[in-house]
Amino acid sequence: MKLTQTQLHLPIYTFNGISLEKSAKGEKNGRTANRLAPSDRAFHDWYRFVLSFPPHLVNSYIEDFGLDGRHVILDPFCGTGTTLVESKLHGIKAIGLESNIFAHFASSVKVDWNIDPELLKKKARHIANSALELLKAEGFDDSSLSKRHAKEGPLRDLDPEAASLLLTNSISPLPLHKTLILLDFLREHKEQPFYRHALLALANALVFRISNLHFGPEVGVGKPKMDVPVVASWLQEVDRIANDLKLVKGRAYPNTITYLGDARNVSDFIEPHSVDAVITSPPYPNEKDYTRTTRLESVILGFIKNKAELKEMKKSFIRSNTRGVYKGDEDDKYVEGHPEIQRIAESIERRRKELGKDSGFEKLYGRVTKLYFGGMARHLAELRSVLRPSAQLAYVVGDQASYLRIMIRTGQLLADIAEALGYKLVRIDLFRTRYATVTREQLREEVVVLRWPGKKR
């Protein structure tokens, strides 16, 4: 049975039966199409990529595909779990796959609703009191942000190798010191069921309250916060999680599984012929290092400790930017026979030479384009073995002009690749448009809708 927002005692958000194309055209640069509605904040707001696709888009395709409790939904690029959370709310079993270690952690926590909310709040306050007592002994009043009144001493800091991974000035010394103290007390409860939820609460507080990061929409560093109430910020996030858990306490929901892994190897994780639908948003072919979005929390909370671990994680990503290209990459061979992808790569290289761009990264622009589409071809080819006949798929992708203003029509190219692999293209929906400041034009963000007919006999 489909579980609605009304049953959860949440405000109702309706899509109003408006087509995706019409809704996108009526919005300035399509910004509001991607915005999180107030009624969608439960569970999703525990931790969310700024550029995540919105829950209402997932709902649209759950409805369009006629999915219910009899079906299984897969999100092979599950990010912070938008598809997984929405599937669970609808009473549909879902499976997620994600190669970013922190995003995988976040999505797995966001679909774990078996935690006692009152115990979470009680334990969090006990941990908070311990941290506040130590801070007070050191001369800090975390609530009033008063100046230190005890004798000076060194502030806690990260291991130098880990610290080198952070964006410069992404967190000020004193907030980092207080965060590390709180984290030490939290880790004393590492084996407790509530630990992961409390840790995710700290991650969200770090990004949006404690750090100097800002998103516009790219991640960057804003005005330094010399001090900030760390413990209170964390407790506020804990309370938000606990309050959402109260909404679903005592209700039965299907199990949701998340795997840490490479979407190009999806059959290593998913049973053959077990998936009825795919709703996902893979990386786009642009010059964006997606690890930067989660770098601060990944490093401070100990998910990534050094450059070697960061590199190993990047190797499991679809190659979408030049900072994630490595010796031995050969996904480009999977699109050697695709003339349009080859033409785009050649156009990028020709433009590079005309403009005299000769940095190491710029020389990779053409190749990373081929690696991206080759990686997506690998993924779609591998995916076929886990799909049931007549499985329906929705891929949210965006046009790009990041590589020297050469237009890449991502949706159409992925549709071409999919058709060559035996998928049927149902349609391409316009989700929204967004203004590209570099090219000064509107770029389309689309949903490529496919159907897998099954193997031909």
Image: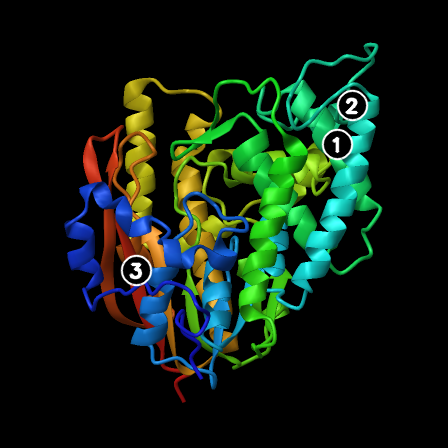
Q: Quadrant of residue 359?
A: top left
Nearest the eye: 241 or 367 = 241
Element under disc 2: loop
Q: In the image, 268: left or right of 51?
A: right
Nearest the eye: 10 or 28 = 10
| Kind of residue at disc 3 | Val
| Kind of residue at disc 1 | Leu
Q: Which residue is mark 1?
A: 180
Q: Which residue is mark 3?
A: 447
- Residue drawn at x 46%, y 70% as measured from the top left: 8
Q: Quadrant of the C terminus?
A: bottom left
Element under disc 3: strand
Nearest the eye: 308 or 350 = 308
Q: Which residue is mark 2?
A: 156
Check contact, mark 1 vs mark 2: CB within 8 A.
yes
Q: Earlier in the sequence, mark 1 or mark 3?
A: 1
Element under disc 1: helix
